[in-house]
Image (tube, helix red, strand yellow):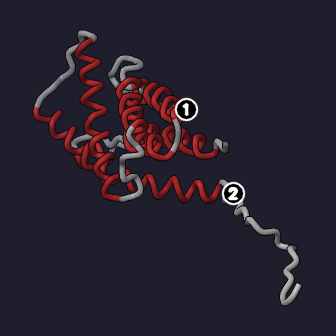
Amino acid sequence: MSYARHILLLLLAFLAVFAETAFDAPRVWLGSHLSLIPPLMVYAALRLDLLAVTTLAVLAGLWLDSFSANPLGASILPLFVIGWILLQRRDLLLRELDYAQLVLGAAASALAPVLTLLLVLSKGLHPDLGWKSLWQLVVLAVTGGVLTPAIFRLLDRLEALFTHPPEVVNPYRPNREMKRGRY
């Protein structure tokens, strides 16, 4: 099995966390940050395997928590739960349709911060919650839903650039001899 998809996914996750922390323009314009990790988790669960879901959850969760006020490791379990649920049900999902990708990306982008909040509250910490938190959740869900089909297309194109197409196996030899007429 080729690990080019796994490497591209982790590289894009690293760049997404970097862009999320380095650029303040979306946070200033929308009043909330943009998170690309839940849409990447949707991609990993629908197109890749358990190894990709687990490594993305662990590494991206640690990268996210190292730049946020969350305790280190608080984002790992919510990301893994989202990936695990989608991985178990991916045969039932219409994963090639843009509408299904949009809905799954919006649901994952809304569920990840809610599950992280539940973990932080269960630890005994008291984050600042209010109406702004609801606005941030709406912005995360909408942007995550819109960006998920774009991420699918981007990673499919990158994969086509860096991997070989599968070999077409022809059941007939190209140099076979055909006898025509009477035998």
**x then y, percent, for residue 7:** 60, 41
* Residue 137 left/right relative to 56: left
Taking the image as drawn, is residue 176 in sight? Answer: yes
Residue placed furthest toward the bottom: 181
Q: Percent from the top left, x then y, of residue 13?
A: 48, 40
In the picture as drawn, the residue positioned furthest to the left comes out as: 131
Say left or right for 119 vs 48.
left
Measuring 41% from the left and 18% from the top, which residue is drawn there? 72
* 51, above or below 29, in the image: above
SS at mark 1 in the image: helix
Which callout, 1 or 2, points at the residue further toward the start of the chain?
A: 1
Mark 2 crowd level (few <14, some 14–19, many ≥20, 10 Å Cα): few
Residue kind at label 2, given as amino acid type: His
CA gap, disc 1 and disc 2: 22 Å
Could you say which is closer to the camera, residue 138 or residue 99? 99
Q: Residue 79: where, in percent of width, then height?
A: 38, 31
Name the quadrant of the C terminus.
bottom right
Residue 111 lies, with reference to residue 138, above or below; the image says above
User: For the point 36% across and 53% down, which residue is it?
Assistant: 94
Q: Which residue is mark 2?
A: 164
Q: Residue at x 43, y 24 (%)?
A: 66
Say which element carries label 2.
Answer: loop
Q: Which residue does the image show at 21% across and 39% down from the upper left? A: 136
Judge whether residue 36 can be spotted in this image.
Answer: no
Residue for badge 1: 51
Quarter of the picture holding the N terminus: top right
